[in-house]
Image (tube, grey):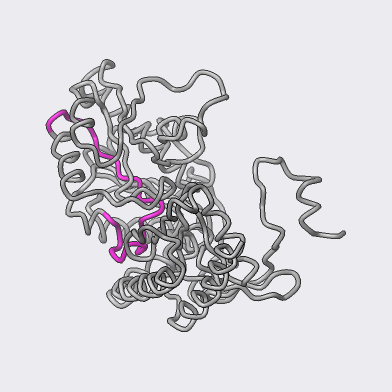
Amino acid sequence: MTVNRELFDQVMVPNYAPSSVIPVRGEGSRVWDQQDREYIDFAGGIAVNCLGHCHPALVKALKEQGEKIWHVSNVMTNEPALRLAKKLVDATFAEKVYFANSGAEANEGALKLARRVALENFGEQKSQIIAFNKGFHGRTFFTVTVGGQAAYSDGFGPKPGDIVHCDYNDLAAFEALISDNTCAVMMEPLQGEGGIISATDEFAKGVRELCTKHNALLIFDEVQTGVGRTGELYAYQGLGVTPDILTTAKALGGGFPIGAMITTTEIAKHLKVGTHGSTYGGNPLACAVGEAAFDTVNTPEVLAGVKAKAQLFNELLSEINDKHQVFSEIRGQGLLIGAVVTEQFKGRAKEFLVAGIAEGVMSLVAGADVVRFTPSLVIPEADIREGMARFEKAVAKVVNG
């Protein structure tokens, strides 16, 4: 069987348009394709591979658990799930954990829980959910409707109701929307897909105060920002704003699919037996790998290292920009970095990504105007410098047409 990019077009549903490059192995922050061409990975599987590729701690956890037990369903619990839940609880504001397989599923659980809490505590009139334009919360029908990009939720028939949106960082608009009929507010502490936009201090604290005032639950979607990405274990810890419910996935498994919703005992009690579930959620394989990833990231050395590496990234990007004048702003937190293209390159961020692949460096975009970097949290300095040297060649090619 010839396994190549053409086979994708023959056998796969056409909702993706993947690169012609097919990676076959990775080690640390480097990846090799079918032709044994090497790439430096600044994409990290979209902020998932928090420890790069084939990190020894993750490989060891997977192999060891793979020879013990893979799946028992939630008719029984399992040791890795209990250990990981305890570590999540000990490291955060939360007291209770629900495991799922993805960020979308964690968000789905959070939204269902919020509706349930409001219904049982206040009555059925309290059902409104507020979210933010350009926000992204997953691709289930509920989460994609809560997400603030109508293009992703249009065209599938009637949408879940009582969901409204306003602009991120616009506290006045938010204050005008929220009322005693609001059951939940879902927000990213830093908008990822929407363009790497940080919440202002005033906005984050203002949203928290208004949620408290109106008995609305504040849900932080930390699917992309969580598990060390910003240089804090979770971004809320750097904001000084504590949500009622937090969702985490992506880096939580370091590449193995896992998601979690975490909250307080008082809120969690509304998901009584039978109200929500997941066949694979909390399975031993995922939780064993998740525990290894969490333990490895949740150290002062790694978290401080994220901030140091971020500084180097920003310096090198600024040097590239001094030469080529292609970015109007470099923004983000920790190793969630967005380079905003100038007016001249508006709508053309993807050209930098494509040119980068040709030069042996993998990056991402966040919308049409932002080049995004989400590398391994433990990427060596030498790989940052080499990757940026390759990226500069890519920038030069785009600039010179």
> Count the marks: how many?
0
Residue 59 in view (yes/no): no
* Residue that sits furthest to the bottom in the current view: 382
Dominant secondary structure of the residues highlighted in magenta in the image: loop
Direction from residue 353 to residue 218 in the image, left or right: left
Direction from residue 295 to residue 384 in the image, left or right: right
Considering depth in this image, is 314 or 395 the residue closer to the camera?
395
Q: For residue 70, what is the image quadrant?
A: bottom right
Considering depth in this image, is 146 or 81 the residue closer to the camera?
146
Residue at 36% in and 38% down: 110
Direction from residue 390 to residue 385 in the image, left or right: left
Look at the picture and state if 196 lies above or below 388: above
Look at the picture and state if 143 lies above or below 321: above
Magenta residues, as a range?
A: 213-235
Q: For residue 361, what is the image quadrant?
A: bottom right
Look at the picture and state if 129 lies above or below 222: above
For residue 222: magenta? yes
Look at the picture and state if 125 lies above or below 381: above
Q: Position of residue 385 (x, y in %)?
A: 47, 80
For residue 263: magenta? no
Q: Position of residue 348 (x, y in %)?
A: 54, 51
Q: Position of residue 237 (x, y in %)?
A: 22, 57
Q: Quadrant of the N terminus?
A: bottom right
Direction from residue 168 to residue 277 in the image, left or right: right
Q: Quadrant of the C terminus?
A: bottom right
Q: Position of residue 34 (x, y in %)?
A: 74, 69
